[in-house]
Amino acid sequence: MALVRSTRLNILLVVALALSTAIIGLQARYIRILQTGDERLPPVEPHVGMSMPPLDVSDSVGHHVLLSYSATRQPTLIYVFRPGCSWCEANSGAVNWLTTHIANTYRVIGLSLSEDGLADFMRAHAMRFPVYRSPSPSTIDSYHLRTTPETIVVSSAGIVLGVWRGAYMEVTKTDIEKFFSVSLPEKLK
């Protein structure tokens, strides 16, 4: 009986030693990664209060443009979309209505994440504001541009004032209406 207990205790000690060694090895590997800087932290999505760099994009004819927020005293509304995005198509009437009603107090720009189909999208949806394209990789990372449609409002000092992801429906619609002090019509095309 004592021999069985001793054997079980030895097995438990060997398992505990193996687990401790594995944990120490993983911690050492993680420390090496942190020291060499090989680990990439996930990009931080824009949020209210965050400072944003100027937009590094191309204009409608392909010229490189660096859009600075301090170039105007008005806050800038950036409407991010992608041709072929069904929610962007459905939202085009709402964003055109909104931007028409805030044009005196906000600089409004569109930002297409894709050039494929952009001309057709623009013909079909007649954006009523300047549209830029081809954001640089640093702009894509800084602004965490993945989701479309997305609306970002940035102050003339480059500080994010508001961020809304998705079409102007339900909670997003309510938040947009409250932020801009407007009442979006129910049906827009």
Image (spheres, helix red, strand yellow):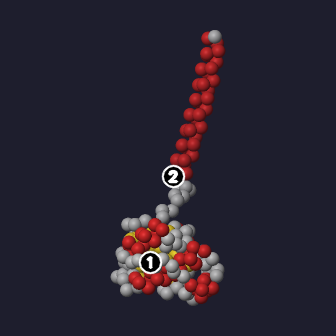
State the residue at coordinates (56%, 38%).
23
Q: Which residue is mark 1?
A: 184
Q: Which quadrant: the C terminus?
A: bottom right
Closer to the observer: label 2 or label 1? 1
What residue is disc 2 on?
35
User: Mark 2–mark 1 contact, CB under 8 Å?
Assistant: no
Whether residue 66 appears in this view of the structure is no
Above or below, 4 against 39 in this view is above
Q: Nearer the viewer, residue 32 or 156?
A: 156
Whichever of callouts 2 and 1 sits on the residue coming sooner in the sequence is: 2
**Residue 107 tag number:** none
In the rendered structure, which amino acid carries the disc numbered 2? Gln
Q: Residue furthest front?
A: 186
Query: Relative to 72, is 158 above or below?
Result: above
Q: For this rendering, which residue is in front, 98 or 115?
A: 98
- Image x and y of residue 110, in percent: 50, 81
The structure residue drawn at horizontal position 37% and vertical position 86%, both measured from the top left corner, is: 104
Amino acid on which the number 1 mark rests in the picture: Leu
Quadrant of the rendered structure where residue 52 is?
Answer: bottom left
Q: Is residue 144 visible?
A: yes
Asked if 119 appears above or below 177 in the picture, the reply is below
Q: Which residue is rendered at x = 60% and y = 20% of the image? A: 9
SS for dot 2:
helix
x, y percentage for residue 133? 56, 80
**In this picture, residue 121 sits left or right of residue 73:** right
